[in-house]
Image (tube, grey):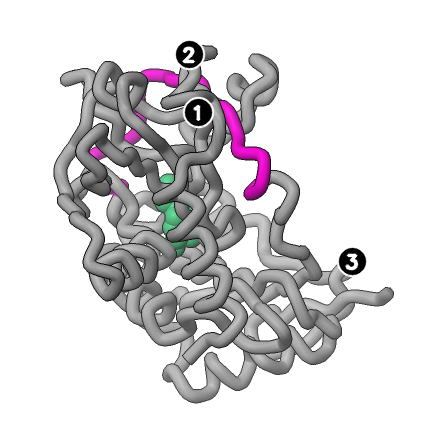
């Protein structure tokens, strides 16, 4: 299958898609991105993802590369040209290409790249659950902005893979779990309360997190936003992660210590089913 990418106004074959060597994304990680799931040909939570894109742009003091209507059209065109029914669409906006100077360039225009690829939901992994290790969270203090500077996330994920785990949960200086390298972390306490980190500068406020939260509230589950410690997570009844590609994935071990009875828990399963139904029928 030949693949196509959108690069600054043009649809080009994926293998020949290029940006300038002085693009500020390349030189300074001066850019932001979004990933939206495509399910049965439809975009899941498109509005909230585009709202977060706008928020990231505003926090970075970057101009939008185009208005929302043409952006939505371009996303659909990339999905169509790549014949994606189930998968993801990736959008990246950088401050553009300019001679290397830290301060914002005066003339540069924001650069927009959109790609899409096929990817089926990871049903087997969701069924079985995953294990995570924990690592110090060495990231900057604006994790709420979805920037392309993922250095710390990349290093942590690689360390997890080398340890035979699916991911790393990142732990701050106070011993609190912030999130995974590309997902939000949740626990279910022994008295069946859902707990996930407060959406502040310490985490990325996941769109899946928000949808799962809304589903949990509709079901009347008890839910609280607060940091939780590693010790609390290891002693929890259940644990799971949420994310655009992970959906709701049970966490069955943390640093080799099993969570609960070491199997995906009932509340996790219930939320997983609710989210799968939701993703299958996006608004
Ligand atoms: N935290 C981090 C650090 C992430 O990279 C992601 C995935 N983009 C998430 C959380 C989950 O966010 P979402 O549900 O919007 O995919």
Residue 282: give x, y in percent of width and height: 46, 75
Q: Mark 1 or 3 closer to N-term?
A: 3
Residue 71 is situated, as x and y percent measured from the top left of the image, at 47, 80
Along the horizontal axis of the image, is 95 left or right of 54? Answer: right
Q: Which residue is mark 1?
A: 168
Where's the N terminus, which quadrant?
Answer: bottom right
Look at the numbered disc 1 and say if its residue's Cβ is closer than 8 Å to ligand 1: no
Residue plotted at (40% across, 70% down): 45
Is 163 within the magenta? no
Magenta stretch: give its range: 126-143
Label pair 3/2, CB-CB below 8 angstroms: no
The kind of secondary structure element at disc 1 is: strand
Residue placed most toward the observer, 224 or 140: 224
Label 3 vs label 2: CA separation?
44 Å
Which residue is located at x 48 percent, y 66 percent? 277
Q: Which residue bears the numbered disc 3?
A: 15
Specify the farthest residue to the right. Answer: 1
Q: Is residue 166 above or below residue 230?
A: below
The quarter of the image holding the C terminus is: bottom left
Q: Which residue is mark 2?
A: 257
């Amino acid at each position: 299958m030949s693949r196509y990418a959108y690069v600054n106004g043009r649809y080009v074959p994926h293998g020949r898609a290029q940006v300038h060597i002085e693009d500020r994304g390349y030189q300074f990680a001066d850019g932001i991105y979004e990933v939206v799931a495509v399910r049965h040909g439809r975009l899941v939570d498109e509005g909230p993802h585009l709202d977060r894109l706008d928020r990231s742009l505003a926090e970075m003091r970057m101009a939008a590369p185009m208005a929302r209507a043409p952006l939505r059209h371009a996303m659909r065109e990339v999905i169509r040209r790549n014949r994606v029914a189930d998968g993801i669409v990736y959008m990246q906006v950088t401050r553009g290409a300019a001679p290397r100077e830290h301060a914002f360039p005066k003339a540069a225009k924001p650069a927009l790249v959109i790609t899409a690829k096929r990817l089926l939901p990871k049903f087997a992994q969701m069924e079985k659950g995953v294990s995570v290790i924990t690592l110090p969270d060495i990231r900057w203090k604006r994790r709420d902005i979805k920037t392309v500077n993922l250095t710390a996330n990349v290093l942590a994920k690689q360390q997890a893979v080398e340890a035979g785990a699916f991911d790393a949960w990142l732990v701050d200086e106070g011993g609190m779990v912030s999130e995974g390298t590309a997902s939000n972390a949740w626990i279910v306490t022994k008295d069946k309360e859902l707990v996930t980190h407060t959406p502040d500068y310490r985490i990325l406020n996941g769109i899946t997190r928000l949808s799962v939260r809304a589903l949990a509230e509709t079901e009347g589950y008890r839910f609280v936003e607060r940091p939780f410690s590693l010790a609390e997570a290891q002693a929890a009844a259940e644990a799971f992660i949420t994310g655009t590609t992970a959906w709701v994935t049970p966490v069955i071990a943390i640093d080799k210590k099993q969570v609960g009875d070491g199997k995906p828990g009932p509340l996790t399963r219930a939320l997983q089913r609710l989210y799968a139904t939701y993703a299958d029928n996006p608004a």
